[in-house]
Image (tube, helix red, strand yellow):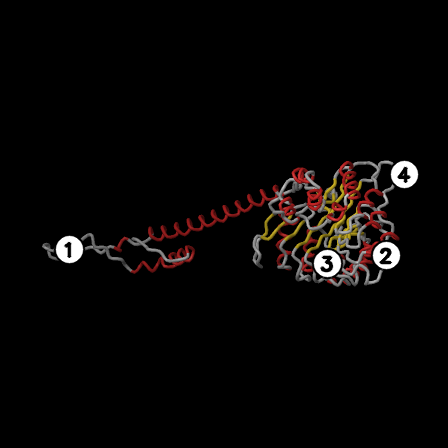
Amino acid sequence: MVFPDDVFREILSYLWPVDVSRFARTSKRSLRIADMVLYRRNHIASVNHLASFCQALTSRASAAHALNMVSIDIREHTRFPIPAIAAALLASPNLTHLAVSLVPPRDPKYYIDPTPLLYASSPTLRELALTTHVPTAALTEFLISHPNLVSLSLPNQSPESMVELGAECVPRLTSITAPPALVACLVPERPVVHAVISRPVPREFMADVIESLAASKGPLLSLGLETEQVSLGVMQEITVRLRDLRSLWVKGRFMFRYSLTYAGLLLDMAPLLGRSPQLTSVSLIGWPAIRALPKSPQSHLSVSPSTPSASFTPSPSPPPAVDHTILEDELQVTRTFHTCARQLREVVFPSGCRWVAKQDDDEATWEPARECHGARVWWVDRELELELAAAQQEAHRIEQLESMRSSRRRSRPSGRFSKPNSSDDDDEQLDYARIELEDDADAEGDVDELFESEQGGGMFIIS
């Protein structure tokens, strides 16, 4: 019995690559089946791996046809074989995701021109991510010849780069990462829902950029931008024109001319955040809350079976240490944000601390995220101190009520017990165990009622 290729391909997908390579050396059919597994998704991090990868694609049609996703992330200072990479891409008709991150050579005379990679890409390409500048003419031709493009990431493109294209070009574009000029050219009349502006936006051009973002057919749901100045005017333009935003990331210098203080500026932003009814996540990164901007984590490109597309993945970095006074101010600002915008579920402040809502409702309380270890310890200690203070206050209140009750009892008259009459018959036996309560029980009613109201219910009185 001979199994079909699909069965072998499914079995090989659960094996380690070294075992799949051993299987490929058994026969020509095994090599063809193994290529469909080994070359479907590839992440290349060295020059030697890149050379063998390009040789396999140009020499074996089975490997070239199997290629679907590839990310090249080489951090070695060397001259890269751009023509060899272009030849390998040209032989791959089913390529849909391409991410290339190359470190420029140390010698400034050499320049990495990614134009051959764009010309060699298949028309079926859906996602492109490059860390090098692309000439404007080559970029324009690429966008015209790739109508299936969904995601475009050019974070290091020249700020002066602009393209003039009609709405019929790249009609499926939904995600873009680029400088402000290129974003303003490609977002209008296209279904863009995610935009990241990779270069600072000058204040005089902020209104034009926001207007172009508002012209998206998406509508725009996620926005990340860096601006020279973050003021109430900038936040007002964003929240008024982009009413469908769900996630906002702003980086820059916070200007608090009329708010007098940085905390006052954040408090003045609270009503503006309430104008976007769908906004659930806000990240404010900048200064003067901290003296300098935190260094952005080094980005690299990755494509893996668990990652559906080529994307920039920041390297993990430990959260910074935060002063407790800053955390206390952030907690108060977060509560004000939630009062004005009850849909908020996440807030990140310039200190680096991320605050999240504990419950998904309007009465949710806020706490630092689990990855913010220092802030988390401070918050837990603070909650314990508040609970201890509340318990001590309650115990003191109960002690005061008990002292009031005991003082009432001590001040009762001694005539509350009735003495037997001496004129009675001597044969009559006196019953001194009988205790008769007088009407002075009502005199302490106010104390009992107060005590019962504090305890939440009635209690028995033994006298």
Q: Nearer the viewer, residue 195 or 33?
A: 33
Question: Counting residues from the N terminus, which is met first, the one under dot 3 or under dot 1?
Answer: 3
- How far across and down, in percent of the image, does residue 134 sit? 85, 49
Q: Earlier in the sequence, mark 3 or mark 4?
A: 4
Asked whether the viewer can see residue 185, the reply is: yes
Res 282 → quadrant:
bottom right
How much space separates mark 3 and mark 1, taking CA atoms?
Answer: 102 Å
Q: Secondary structure at mark 1?
A: loop
How far apart are labels 1 and 2 at the CA level?
A: 120 Å
Q: Which residue is mark 3?
A: 193
Q: What residue occupies the far left of the structure in this picture?
A: 427
Determine whether 50 is above or below 363 in the image.
Answer: above
Of discs 3 and 1, which sits in the foreground?
3
Q: Which residue is mark 1?
A: 422
Q: Position of residue 392 (x, y in %)?
A: 47, 47
Q: Residue at x 87, y 41 (%)?
A: 111
Q: CA distance from mark 3 to mark 4?
A: 39 Å
